[in-house]
């Protein structure tokens, strides 16, 4: 099982870093159990496992040391004497075949012998799952990432044990892992951070009744990972474990796309540092499930939220607030990255074209020019409609702009339908922006 593989990679890296020689069982007893379960608040809730199976009158936060140790012994007994199932080997099939459809992942009818140590590895792997918004977790078989994730466990444990944070919700280790990695690998990490710093980073949500870990946007995690590995492709297993298990599968993550967007942004806005902020980076990325449907997580998946509602229609940005400008910058960055893909130079000429179109509108009589631009040219849902509107414009265009318009006609003719969608949407945004600036 993938959780076992991740657990093995992690323990090997741990032993190498700290010069130890832990077996999986010894590490579970001396380190993992002490962090995750030997406290009033658990770090993880594993459905049907010995740690959540309570005798009459028992509750996790009321268990004493002896009772918690007994539950550990129950796990040891199962691992040693029983065929592994999902109740004590995380990610393994359920005990009953009829339950496979809802509570099992990666089930096979091939008989696979499982050693006792693999049971404990599966717990480490599960505890290293990286939770993101959308209810899914990522497992990445990379020793550096796994060790960075592990280093965050002690902070979550300390917060759970902090008497001043008694409202802090337990059992959120995967959500914590996602937030921790994003912060730790991000540009603004501070080694001397405290809880208030994390609250301001929106890692924690604090109300009068509850404190909980927010789940991180996958795009924020993506950009932080791209800080660590600017050119690497990571293979990630994407899933969720719970009352029902969901298996998305193995999805490659192309971190180079993060650098591509950063480079485009710097080219467009050399003096603006907003790309490095968590708020700006969160504007990118379609829903994680939709991203996985693409077969990989890269530039296409990083399409800014809500951008598609501007495709093939006259709907445009308003630019009435600062937030509209920031959204425009995210849209433009992604659109130009897509249009400049596989090209050596980052090309941005739509703003100049937008100014050309405004000059045409100024020379037109009445509202005819404005209507042609906004209702036909920029609202065109095909190259044919766009070129027809462009042809209508030619007689009224200034002589100095005529050559640029002819060049535009030739370029649009050679575009793919996808490229045209991106190009005309960007032109529509730049037209509105130029109009606001004039």
Image: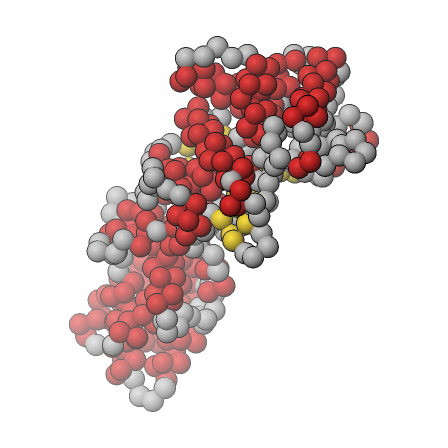
Note whether 143 is above or below 77 in the view shown. Answer: below
Residue extending farthest bottom: 366
State the scheme by which the image is colored.
Answer: secondary structure
Confirm whether residue 174 shows in the render.
Answer: no
Along the line of sight, the residue nearer the viewer: 110 or 346: 110
Rendered location of residue 185, percent (x, y): 37, 37
- Identified at 52% across, 45% down, the residue is 165
Judged left or right of residue 168, residue 82 is: right
Along the line of sight, the residue nearer the viewer: 424 or 75: 75
Residue extending farthest top: 21
- Identified at 48% across, 31% down, the residue is 154
Judged left or right of residue 361, residue 239 is: right
Note whether 115 is above or below 192 in the view shown. Answer: above
Q: Name the quarter where the C terminus is drawn.
A: bottom left
Confirm whether residue 269 shows in the render.
Answer: yes
Rendered location of residue 13, percent (x, y): 44, 19
Note whether 339 is above or below 106 in the view shown. Answer: below
Rendered location of residue 319, percent (x, y): 36, 71
Along the line of sight, the residue nearer the viewer: 404 or 320: 320
């Amino acid at each position: 099982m993938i959780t076992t593989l991740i657990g093995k990679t992690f323990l090997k890296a741990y032993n190498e870093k700290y010069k130890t020689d832990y077996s999986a069982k010894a590490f579970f007893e001396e380190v993992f159990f002490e962090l995750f379960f030997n406290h009033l608040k658990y770090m993880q809730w594993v459905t049907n496992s010995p740690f959540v199976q309570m005798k009459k009158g028992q509750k996790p936060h009321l268990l004493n040391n002896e009772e918690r140790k007994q539950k550990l012994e129950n796990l040891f007994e199962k691992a040693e004497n029983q065929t592994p199932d999902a109740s004590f080997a995380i990610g393994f099939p359920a005990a009953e075949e009829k339950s496979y459809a809802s509570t099992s992942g990666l089930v096979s009818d091939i008989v696979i012998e499982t050693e006792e140590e693999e049971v404990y590895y599966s717990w480490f792997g599960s505890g290293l799952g990286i939770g993101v918004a959308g209810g899914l977790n990522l497992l990445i078989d990379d020793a550096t990432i796994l060790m960075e994730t592990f280093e965050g466990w002690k902070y979550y444990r300390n917060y759970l044990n902090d008497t001043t944070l008694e409202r802090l919700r337990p059992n959120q280790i995967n959500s914590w892992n996602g937030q921790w990695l994003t912060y730790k690998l991000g540009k603004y990490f501070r080694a001397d951070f405290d809880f208030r710093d994390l609250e301001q980073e929106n890692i924690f949500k604090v109300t009068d009744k509850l404190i909980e870990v927010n789940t991180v946007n996958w795009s924020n995690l993506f950009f932080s990972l791209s800080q660590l590995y600017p050119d690497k492709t990571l293979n990630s297993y994407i899933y969720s474990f719970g009352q029902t298990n969901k298996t998305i599968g193995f999805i490659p993550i192309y971190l180079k796309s993060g650098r591509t967007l950063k480079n485009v942004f710097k080219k467009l806005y050399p003096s603006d540092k907003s790309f490095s902020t968590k708020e700006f980076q969160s504007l990118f990325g379609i829903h994680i499930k939709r991203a996985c449907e693409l077969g990989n997580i890269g530039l296409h998946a990083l399409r800014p939220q809500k951008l598609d509602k501007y495709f093939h229609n006259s709907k445009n940005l308003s630019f009435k607030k600062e937030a509209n400008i920031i959204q425009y910058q995210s849209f433009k960055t992604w659109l130009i990255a897509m249009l400049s893909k596989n090209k050596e130079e980052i090309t941005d000429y739509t703003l100049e074209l937008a100014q050309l179109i405004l000059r045409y509108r100024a020379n037109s009589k009445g509202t005819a020019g404005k209507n042609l631009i906004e209702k036909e040219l920029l609202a065109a849902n095909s190259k044919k409609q766009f070129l027809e509107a462009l042809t209508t414009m030619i007689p009224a265009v200034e002589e100095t702009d005529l050559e640029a318009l002819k060049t535009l006609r030739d370029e649009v003719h050679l575009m793919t339908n996808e490229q045209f969608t991106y190009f005309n949407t960007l032109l529509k945004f730049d037209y509105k922006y130029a109009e606001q600036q004039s």
